[in-house]
């Protein structure tokens, strides 16, 4: 909403020709004495007279799972065939932690 308000505050009075390919996804401002178009969304039984386009933007309020594994580093002595010993490190006592964040997304997360 903040971007939209900033865009409206930057509107200038001079009118420039624009192409639909260069303005896709941008804020476009124009003036007209009367608009005789009607937009509708049959799924929600919404009809708006005097509008050029009605766009539905669906968002899902959902929980997103985050997984984090935490392990300790353990050591052990290993005896070689020649009788020498060496120390090696490995991951042990691993714990998987889960956390969740709630957010609005324009796509479903599993």
Image: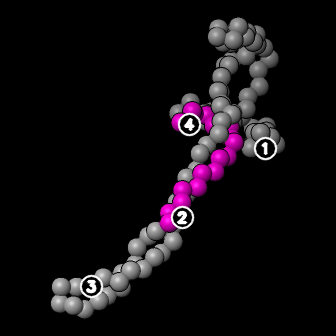
Neighbour tally class for label 4: few under 14, some 14-19, many 20 plus, Cα within 10 Å: few
Spatial separation of the CA atoms under disc 4 and disc 1? 26 Å
**SS class, disc 1:** helix
Spatial separation of the CA atoms under disc 3 and disc 2? 29 Å
What residue is shown at x 58% (from left), y 55% (from top)?
A: 97
Q: Name the residue under label 3.
A: 79
Q: Which of marks 3 and 4 is in front?
A: 3
Looking at the picture, tell me which residue is in the foreground, 97 or 55: 97
**SS class, disc 4:** loop
Q: Mark 1 points at which residue?
A: 2
Which label sits on residue 109? 4
Name the N-terminal-most of marks 1 and 2.
1
Name the N-terminal-most of marks 3 and 1.
1
Spatial separation of the CA atoms under disc 3 and disc 4? 49 Å
User: With 2 as the anchor, is 84 left or right in this view?
Assistant: left
Name the N-terminal-most of marks 4 and 1.
1
User: With 87 as the anchor, is 15 left or right in this view?
Assistant: right
Q: Name the residue under label 2.
A: 70
Task: Check if mark 3's residue and mark 4's residue have beta carbons within 8 Å.
Answer: no
Number of numbered discs on residues: 4
What residue is shown at x 65% (from left), y 27% (from top)?
A: 57
What residue is shown at x 65% (from left), y 8% (from top)?
A: 42
* Residue 2 x, y percent position in the rendering: 78, 44
Spatial separation of the CA atoms under disc 1 and disc 2? 40 Å
Look at the image and tell me whether residue 48 can be seen. yes
Looking at the picture, tell me which residue is in the foreground, 44 or 72: 72
Q: What stretch is highlighted in magenta?
A: 93-110
Task: Check if mark 4's residue and mark 1's residue have beta carbons within 8 Å.
Answer: no
- The quarter of the rendered structure image containing the N terminus is top right
Asked if 42 appears above or below 53 in the picture, the reply is above
């Amino acid at each position: 909403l903040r971007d939209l308000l900033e865009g409206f505050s930057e509107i200038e009075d001079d009118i420039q020709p624009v192409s639909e390919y260069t303005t896709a996804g941008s804020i476009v401002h124009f003036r007209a004495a009367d608009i005789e178009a009607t937009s509708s969304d049959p799924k929600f039984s919404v009809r708006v007279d005097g509008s050029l386009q009605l766009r539905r933007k669906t968002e899902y309020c959902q929980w997103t799972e985050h997984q984090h594994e935490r392990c300790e580093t353990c050591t052990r002595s290993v005896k070689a065939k020649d009788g020498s010993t060496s120390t090696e490190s490995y991951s042990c006592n691993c714990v998987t932690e889960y956390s969740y964040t709630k957010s609005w997304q324009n796509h479903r997360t599993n």
